[in-house]
Image: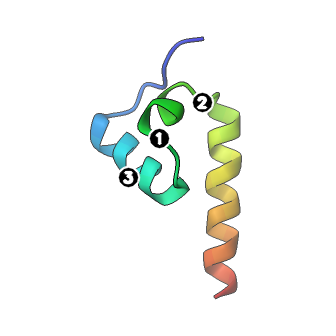
Amino acid sequence: MRPLQISAETAQKLAESLNLPLEQIMHMPQHILLARLADIQKQENKK
């Protein structure tokens, strides 16, 4: 599997928001990453 095609800055922001190591973000399948981001967005909208 290829690493995600995102910038280093974007990867760092995602790692911070998901509380995951940067390496895990870069090698995470795109559909799983999008699902996690959607979950975070839902939680923020509830606040």
Identify the mark at residue 21; answer none if there is no mark.
Answer: 1
- Which residue is located at x 63 percent, y 88 percent? 47
Label 3 Cα neighbours within 10 Å, binned few <14 / some 14-19 / many ≥20: few
Q: Against 12, is 28 above or below?
A: above
Label 1 Cα neighbours within 10 Å, binned few <14 / some 14-19 / many ≥20: few
Alpha carbon of mark 1 to alpha carbon of mark 2: how far?
Answer: 11 Å
Q: For numbered disc 1, what is the local secondary structure?
A: loop
Alpha carbon of mark 1 to alpha carbon of mark 3: how far?
Answer: 11 Å
Q: For numbered disc 2, what is the local secondary structure?
A: loop
Is disc 1 in contact with disc 3, using a CB cutoff of under 8 Å?
no
Label 2 Cα neighbours within 10 Å, binned few <14 / some 14-19 / many ≥20: some
The mark lying in front, picked from 1 and 2, is 1
Q: Against 4, is 21 above or below?
A: below
Q: What amino acid is at disc 2?
A: Met
Indicate the position of residue 43 as horizontal and vertical percent values: 68, 74
- Which residue is located at x 35 percent, y 45 percent? 12
Q: Which residue is mark 3?
A: 13
The first of marks 1 and 3 along the sequence is 3
Q: Which residue is mark 2?
A: 28
Is disc 2 in contact with disc 3, using a CB cutoff of under 8 Å?
no
Residue 44 lies in quadrant: bottom right
Q: What amino acid is at disc 3?
A: Lys
Q: What amino acid is at disc 1?
A: Pro
- Which residue is located at x 71 percent, y 48 percent? 35
